[in-house]
Amino acid sequence: MSFAVRWLACATMVLSAAALSSQTTGAQTGAAAPVHRGSWKLLYEQNFEDPAPLFKAGLPRWVPDSYQDTDDYSDGGAHFQRLGVTPPVAFRAEGTFGKDGWLSVAAYSRSDATKFSDLFQVVADPADAHHRVLKVSSPAHTDGIVVRPTKALPKKYRVCLKVGFASFGDGKPGAGSLNGYAGGEKDEPWSNGDATLENGFYWLTILDATPRPHNNVWIHHHRKVTIDSDNNKEAWTNIWEGKDWVADGQHPIMMFGIDKDGQDDGNTGRPFLSWSHGALQSSGAIRAVDAYKDNTWYSACIERNENAFVLTTSGDFKWGGQQTYVGTIPIGSVYQAGDGVPDFFMFGDPHNNYYRGTVYYDDIRLETWQE
């Protein structure tokens, strides 16, 4: 199946989602739905069918970590200095790829003997060997790897991709569940807890700073809106399972923004504004929209328009079946969404003290609004 045909369904779904979000906003406020003049213009797209090497200058090489003190919550930033935390010796590998080098990969490891190809590799599609896709992995929970745009996003944008066949734990409760880990992993040195209680990956998210792997506290203070999954053994996620909210940490899909009016916690940041069961939930409620299935592809999109972030996921879900979920989060509700604050999308595993596993991505597409 060609790239254009594979994306036809996603494009149709997103256009419907944008229309729905406008209608919903109008219904909630009592005002007429806004009239949008213009259209989406494709800026870049990236699949992985071309057999030519992805990186023109060869694979990125590991170099000593020089991003330990870029802000308060980076690995050696002021927040952790006050706590007496010393970041570990670490290494980073970064490179650009795609047309005009529009995409960047940023990887982290505590050993420069780690094979970059063990974290980032183009492979056969697990659903169809005739196609090639991107495989992103964290062989150790102290590894991290993300893909981002090389430059900040335009004022209005829509980014979409395919994501699936995730193997980042299962969230099953009980002492015998390793949740995708080897066993005994800690979230040190930034904390000293049991890392195996949580395992997951980011489907697609928007940050206010250049995305790179850091400790988990860093991203808690830089997220704007997010589609992600955190398989948690303590079942602190509530999933709408068709009839009721159920405490369940197995394969949850979160669609949320960060409440700008919520209290900032040093370890977790500001509270969530979760979208689930067709509505924006109360601040701090950790409610998932559904659960993902193993060995399944999904599409994920985030749009920023004049009034809102529109988050969309589509595919065959555990509880909702074949479904498209559309979450609309007003820009005025989201932390760090004001003028002058950059937007970067990101996907992968951004934590260098949590998460161990593998997930696949394909058909990355960036559009901007043209009047």
Image (spheres, rainbow, N blue to C red):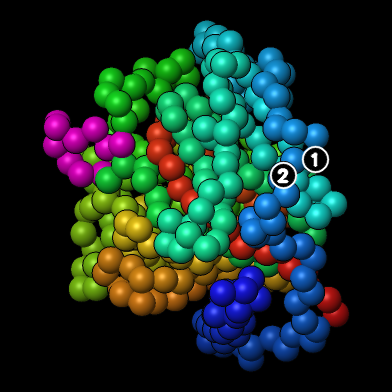
Please tell me in which quadrant of the rendered image residue 212 appears: top right
Q: Is residue 76 visible?
A: yes
Q: Which residue is mark 2?
A: 53
Asked if 345 appears above or below 244 in the picture, the reply is above
Question: Going by the image, does 44 lie left or right of 303?
Answer: right
Q: Is residue 274 magenta?
A: no
Question: Going by the image, does 169 lie left or right of 334?
Answer: left
The range drawn in magenta is 171-180
Is the stretch drawn in magenta largely helix, strand or loop?
A: loop
Residue at x 46%, y 48% (from the top left corner): 359
**Residue 14, position in %: x, y?**
58, 77
Q: Nearer the viewer, residue 125 or 36?
A: 125
Disc 1 marks which amino acid?
Answer: Lys
**Residue 250, position in %: x, y?**
26, 51
Quadrant of the frame with the N terminus: bottom right
Asked if 16 appears above or below 101 in the picture, the reply is below
Q: Which residue is mark 1?
A: 56
Mark 1–mark 2 CB contact (< 8 Å): yes
Residue at x 81%, y 55% (from the top left corner): 99
Q: Nearer the viewer, residue 156 or 166?
A: 166
CA gap, disc 1 to disc 2?
A: 7 Å
Residue at x 24%, y 40% (from the top left corner): 233
**Residue 313, position in %: x, y?**
48, 68
